[in-house]
Image (cartoon, helix red, strand yellow):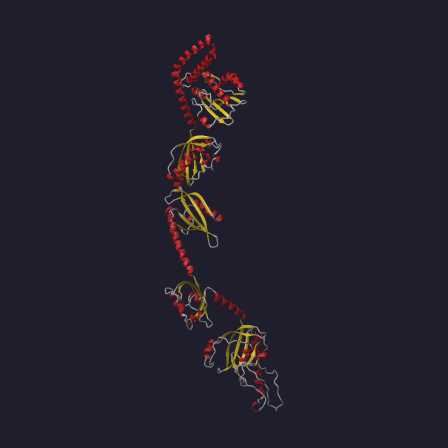
Amino acid sequence: MLRKVYPKGACPFLCPWQRIEKKTKFDSFPEGKYVVNVKNYAMQTNNQNIKINTFGGGNMEDKEKSRDQLLAEISELREEVQELKFYKAVLDQLPVCTILYDASETVIYRNRASKAIDGYEHQELVGLSRDEYLKQLHIKPGKAIKMKDPQKDISYFKKSIYEMNETTLRTKNGTLRDVLLVGDFIYDEEENILGACGCAVDITEHALKDKMYRLLAENAQDLIFRYRLVPSFQFEYVSPTSSVIAGHMPEELYENPYLALLGVHQDDRPLIKAQLQSPQPLSATIRLVHKDGTTKWVEVKSVVANDRYGNPAVEGIIRDVTERVQAERELKENLRFLQKLIDTIPNPVYYKDNNGIFRGCNAAFETDMGFTKEETMGRSIYELRTKDLADIYTEKDSELFRTTGKQVYETVIPYADGTMHDVVLYKGVFTDSNDGVAGLVGVIIDVTKSKETQRALSESEDLYRRLVELSPELIGVHDFTGEIVFLNQAGVKLLNAKNETEIIGKNITQFIHPDYMQAVTEAMQKMHETNEPLQWFEQKLLKLNGSPFEVEATGVPLHFRGGPAVLVVARDITERKQWEREMSRLERLNLIGQMAAGIGHEVRNPMTTVRGFLQMFQAKNDLMPYKSHLNLMIEELDRANSIIGQFLSLAKDKPVDKKVQNLNSVVEALSPMIQANVFRYDMYLELKLQEIPDLFLDEKEMRQLILNLCRNGLEAMSPGGTLSITTYTEGEEVVLSVADEGKGMQPEVMENLGTPFFTTKDDGTGLGLAVCYSISARHNASIDAMSTSEGTTFSVRFKLMG
């Protein structure tokens, strides 16, 4: 049997495979002796080295074998060679670059995958020493532990089996590739090192990803770490963010890993110590004491992973959540504050999520609705109210969720005492961080009492509104700038407007007579200063058309529509003033009449005697030269007697002889006389006599009244003018109108019309209109005068017979 040994320096993973020739050559030797020429070969099976002798030529004395012996050994060798070829084929099919060195560190084998990584042909690198090989491929030394004495350290390698290195190599075309190297020694049966085997895996793509991940880790704001616990607590990786979060550089933690534990707040250390003693996945928020002494809140998340030796290692992330924790604290404080705040609100407040589940309420809700927070939270309205009410509330909530925004409506709900209350519900939606509807907030306003008050107020307002609108006096409101903001119907009518829109918005000063502007301004200023109502005072206002009228007015400060304002009340005293003037005039006329009645007979008797003697003197011939003088004296006596008669007619108690008759008849009877006077003055007469009812009239006084008015009209006109006499019915009155086309009268003249002895004529007595006013008074009539630059009209108004 051949002895199976490796030739010196030969090993199946360190040398090129030697081929045993398929056919063994036998030389011509004496019968029974054979010589075999076999080239070097070797093999290894099941990780056991099989050593085979090398046969060669030379001295054949010790190598002569019997034919049977030789054939048996050759057959055995052929089987072993076939097995070696099989393993060689397996190595060539491996996708991992495999290289074998002999004991002298010479490259003796490269499989096919080697060329795929470095691009070199086998013959270009086989035979190079290890250093030459590393230099040729520009391979940098890795980080694996280098053994000082492999034979002594072999027990360690039996446990670790492989040592891995990450490095780079330069391919034949010059590109760099990242590779992962792993290798081990090859031993003989006595565990002597015969060579080495090295494998290389192309991790270029993996390295790129690893660099990217490392770049991300080193630039992340979170602290990323990995530490192992066997054989001792030691960090394998710490990202640079440790200097920001913990205040320690990664190198400090590599050198002294317990700095990380010391940096944990003492109240949180038990949690971390338990993690070191029995590693478990961790997710917790703890406090770290920074190197500068400040405390930070951090969120720690870690998982347990085994290292390549099967020992536990921990990988994790630490995130600075100080701001978040502070924000959460502030949020909690704000929530507590808001809860306190809504608890102080006297109205019930509640809120629900978007599924209609109550999530909270205030103290007023508990009191008024009769449900505690615990009874309310987590429940729907169907668990708190009857189905019919719950259906209504749910439908309203759904409508709000569909439309978003706000919702306000009135309804009736039962209170804790069982009574039904009128309420107004104010509801609005609130959103989540994605602007989606998260729920609603509701506020319940009890308006039961306010509705009762509102009804009473409405009735009161309606009453006062009716009083204001039905008041015959002007009632208006203007703000402190003078803008009119309210006016009743009496005011609209008094100012001669069609409706209040013609007045509202205008300034009060537009309606104050210029003669009273200063007095009104001073009175208003005083009211603003004292905030006291004004005393009633008389003034003149202007209608919308500019015509003046007299009023008695007052002002009261108040608030109107949310701002300071003035309430103005004014009553029209034009008619009263007119009656006062009329009464004053009549009193004066009556006084004059009474005086005239008292002295009339005393004056008239001597005048009659004088007139008689004058008439007698006219009959004497010797006094004929003085006849013209005597005629003048008689005329003056008659004129004086006429004046005395007019004086007597001013007395209010003068007897009158009233009869039912038509005023038109009196006018028509006088028209020839009036026409004669009109013709004499070169003027025109126009009669407009409408059908009018009969009146109680004293014809004699009516004739005097009409003639006096016509005489005044004719004297006021220039030749060519027209005197118009008109009769008509207006309401409950019959009107006699006498109009001229003169130049009109001045206001001061208008104010003194009818005053005895007031006249604008050089030869006038001032008794004509005074007599007219007396006659109208005795007939319960009134006289109106209207004068413009185009003429004057006197209207005598008789009341219809009852």
Q: Position of residue 283 (x, y in %)?
A: 43, 63
User: Can you say which quadrant of the picture contains the N terminus?
Assistant: bottom right
Closer-to-camera residue (572/420): 572
Q: Position of residue 669 (x, y in %)?
A: 51, 16
Q: Residue at x 41, y 11 (%)?
A: 609
Closer-to-camera residue (304/164): 164
Residue 354 can be seen in this image: no
Is 269 displayed left or right of 6 in the figure? left
User: Can you say which quadrant of the picture contains the C terminus?
Assistant: top left
Residue 449 can be seen in this image: yes
| As drawn, 68 above or below 441 | below
Closer-to-camera residue (508/192): 508
Q: Residue at x 40, y 56 (%)?
A: 330
| As drawn, 566 above or below 647 | below
Q: Position of residue 623 (x, y in %)?
A: 46, 9
Q: Position of residue 116 (x, y in %)?
A: 58, 74
- Residue extending farthest to the right is 28
Residue 63 picture quarter: bottom right
Q: How many marks?
A: 0
| As drawn, 698 above or below 318 | above
